[in-house]
């Protein structure tokens, strides 16, 4: 199994994290743009993070 990181997926996650921060700052974004950001950024972030997660048993997760 390769452990090399993908620059593409790291960049996707960085952009999604930026959108989370941008959405929570409440800066001068109009409501339409915020609605577009909220429509996809968290579901996509959860999908990408879950796609790369490793399957562990409960004992492995809790260090037992």
Image: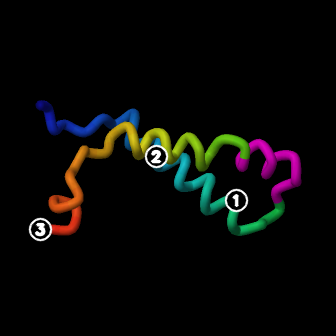
The C terminus - image quarter:
bottom left
The dot on residue 2 is none
Left or right placement of residue 11 versus residue 20 in this view: left
Gap in angstroms between the C-alphas marked 1 and 3: 38 Å
Which residue is denoted by mark 1 in the rendering?
23
Image marks 2 and 1: residues in contact by CB distance under 8 Å: no
Residue 16, image x and y in percent? Answer: 55, 48
Q: Is residue 44 above or below residue 20?
A: above
Q: Secondary structure at mark 3?
A: loop
Dot 1 crowding, Cα within 10 Å, few <14, some 14–19, many 20+: some
Region in magenta: 29-38
The N terminus - image quarter:
top left
* Between 46 and 15, the one nearer to me in the picture: 46
Dot 2 crowding, Cα within 10 Å, few <14, some 14–19, many 20+: some
Residue 3, image x and y in percent? Answer: 15, 38
Residue 21, image x and y in percent? Answer: 61, 62
């Amino acid at each position: 199994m390769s452990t090399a990181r993908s620059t593409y997926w790291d960049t996707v996650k960085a952009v999604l994290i930026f959108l989370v921060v941008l959405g929570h700052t409440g800066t001068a974004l109009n409501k339409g743009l915020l609605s577009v950001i909220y429509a996809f950024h968290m579901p996509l972030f959860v999908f990408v993070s879950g796609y790369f997660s490793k399957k562990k048993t409960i004992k492995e997760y809790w260090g037992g």
